Image (cartoon, rainbow, N blue to C red):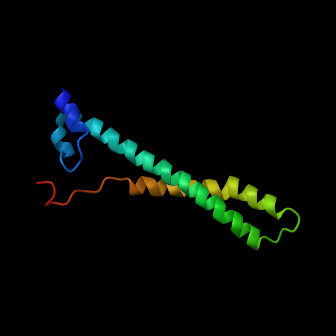
């Protein structure tokens, strides 16, 4: 049992998932967590980048004369930031997906 657990945490290149036998569902769970973690990381980065970029863009191009800074802050924090976070999350989930193995690598 300990040897199986050691194989589970070995690198993907050294131990292909299909050779793990009964441990394959756990390996799939780890891959899903990695993918979810990358999605969350990209989502947070997307929120920060989107909010900062939109704040400066709204400050520059808004025609509002009375409360431009409030408009920029609220639009960035509550609209553009969350939209960028969702796009970043989707991008992170796509980036974290498993790549199909090439025919020469799996042998």
Q: Position of residue 89 (x, y in %)?
A: 50, 53
Q: Position of residue 26 (x, y in %)?
A: 29, 35
Q: Is residue 84 above or below residue 2?
A: below
Q: Is residue 48 above or below residue 3?
A: below
In the picture, residue 5 is in which quadrant?
top left
The total number of labels drawn is: 0
Measuring 40% from the left and 57% from the top, which residue is drawn there?
Answer: 95
Residue 47 left/right relative to 73:
left
Measuring 15% from the left and 60% from the top, which residue is drawn there?
Answer: 103
The N terminus appears in which quarter of the rendering?
top left
Q: Position of residue 104 (x, y in %)?
A: 13, 61
Instruction: Identify which residue, 73 or 84, lies in the foreground.
Output: 73
Viewer can see residue 96: yes
Measuring 75% from the left and 68% from the top, which residue is drawn there?
Answer: 59
Measuring 15% from the left and 41% from the top, which residue is drawn there?
Answer: 19
Residue, far left: 107
Q: Is residue 92 above or below residue 7?
A: below
In the picture, residue 32 is in which quadrant?
top left
Residue 64 left/right relative to 40:
right
The C terminus appears in which quarter of the rendering?
bottom left
Residue, far right: 66
Q: Position of residue 57 (x, y in %)?
A: 70, 69
Viewer can see residue 86: no
């Amino acid at each position: 049992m300990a040897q199986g657990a050691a194989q589970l945490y070995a690198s993907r290149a050294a131990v292909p998932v299909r050779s793990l036998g009964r441990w394959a569902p756990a390996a799939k769970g780890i891959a899903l967590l990695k993918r979810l973690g990358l999605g969350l990381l990209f989502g947070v980065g997307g929120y920060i980048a989107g909010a900062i970029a939109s704040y400066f863009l709204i400050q520059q191009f808004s025609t509002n004369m009375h409360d431009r800074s409030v408009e920029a802050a609220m639009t960035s924090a509550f609209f553009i930031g969350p939209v960028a976070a969702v796009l970043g999350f989707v991008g992170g989930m796509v980036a974290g997906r498993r790549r199909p193995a090439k025919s020469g690598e799996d042998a």
